[in-house]
């Protein structure tokens, strides 16, 4: 993909989104960093030779979208996390709130952007999902379900927009050193339920052994993500850190039972306590 025109990155105040916005600007795109609190991005313009503008749209409010007329890259990164809870003890309010931002917000801004992207094609829609959808991860159902919905949306968009020369890219991050990742590793709410405590403890141990040693920086992840955006002949799905790249390669070669064996089978074998 040739580097010209504009890019918009949602959820760009911190973490991966901020680093993607900087990387796109550094590579030559006029970049709009969308965030709910523009004050969080006050320093961005100075670090990108004036190629980056901060705006304040709300992905849940289509009336706040202000997309540039030369838009060629849309990165849907805005998202929220969910409490680390068994489905049995989760709150439907949390599920609805999560889907409102992670799915409906993404669909809303994508719908608004498609006509402009089509007019400026070739163009790219890059959606950030999660490598957690590839394996059996307990206590993360609401977040994983929202990201699986994003993944399914990518599959449909890929077909629908191919005739318009709009490429769809899905990024499935694993452990990247962001506030959201650190908060999720510290959330052990599932251990508060006797029936699930042993499984939650074992899942935490497994995460410490496999994910924590492979944490990538947001900057390194962003460089791989922008490489994927510019990779015209590449696949739809990409990892952006060592764990997600390896997990995605395994997923492509495996069936459901193999992926279940990776994490789920050992955790599912945990003996329930006698609660009577």
Image: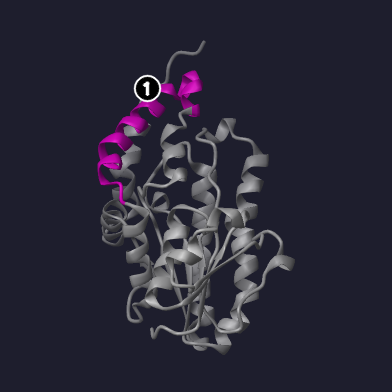
- Whether the magenta-drawn stretch holds residue 193 is answered as yes
Q: From the viewer's perspective, is residue 241 above or below residue 22?
A: above
Q: Position of residue 97 (x, y in %)?
A: 65, 47
State the image quarter where residue 204 is shown. top left
**Whole-percent x, y for residue 79 in the image:** 55, 53
Nearer to us in this view, 52 or 3: 52
* Count of numbered circles in the view: 1
Is 260 on the left-hand or right-hand side of 43? left
For residue 200, side relative to residue 35 (left or right): left
Q: Quadrant of residue 184?
A: top left
Q: Answer whether residue 213 is magenta in the image.
A: yes
Return the residue nearer the eye: 133 or 258: 133
243 in relation to 186, above or below: below
Q: Which residues are magenta?
A: 189-216
Return the residue at label 1.
271
Which quadrant of the view contains residue 233? bottom left
Front residue of 90 and 188: 188
In terms of secondary structure, what is the magenta stretch mainly? helix
Which residue lies at the image location 33% right of the left edge and 52% below the top edge?
Answer: 217
The foreground one among 12 and 193 is 12
**Please, which colouring scheme is shown?**
one colour
Q: Give the residue displayed 48% in from the left and 74% down from the top.
A: 51
Density class for disc 1 (Cα within 10 Å; few <14, some 14-19, many ≥20) is few
Position of the N terminus by quadrant: bottom left
């Amino acid at each position: 993909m040739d580097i010209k025109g504009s890019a918009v990155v949602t959820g760009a105040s911190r973490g991966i989104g901020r680093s993607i916005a900087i990387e796109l600007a550094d590579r030559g795109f006029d970049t709009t960093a969308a965030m709910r609190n523009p004050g969080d991005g006050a320093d961005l313009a100075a670090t990108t030779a004036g190629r980056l503008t901060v705006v304040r749209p709300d992905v849940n409010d289509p009336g706040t979208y202000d997309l540039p007329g030369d838009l060629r890259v849309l990165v849907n990164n805005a998202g929220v996390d969910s409490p680390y809870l068994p489905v049995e003890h989760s709150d439907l309010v949390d599920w609805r709130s999560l889907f409102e931002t992670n799915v409906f917000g993404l669909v809303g801004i994508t719908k608004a952007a498609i006509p402009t992207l089509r007019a400026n094609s070739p163009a790219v829609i890059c959606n950030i999902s999660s490598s957690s959808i590839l394996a059996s991860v307990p206590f993360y159902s609401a977040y994983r379900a929202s990201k699986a919905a994003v993944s399914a949306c990518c599959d449909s968009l890929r077909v629908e927009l191919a005739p318009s020369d709009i490429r769809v890219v899905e990024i499935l991050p694993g452990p990247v050193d962001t506030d959201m990742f650190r908060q999720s590793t510290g959330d052990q709410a599932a251990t508060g339920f006797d029936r699930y405590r042993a499984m939650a403890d074992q899942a935490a141990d497994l995460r410490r052994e496999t994910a924590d040693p492979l944490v990538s920086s947001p900057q390194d992840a962003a460089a791989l993500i922008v490489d994927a955006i510019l990779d015209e002949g590449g696949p739809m799905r990409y990892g952006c850190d060592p764990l997600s790249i390896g997990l995605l390669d395994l997923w492509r070669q495996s069936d459901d039972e193999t992926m279940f064996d990776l994490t789920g089978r050992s955790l599912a074998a945990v003996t329930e306590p006698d609660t009577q």
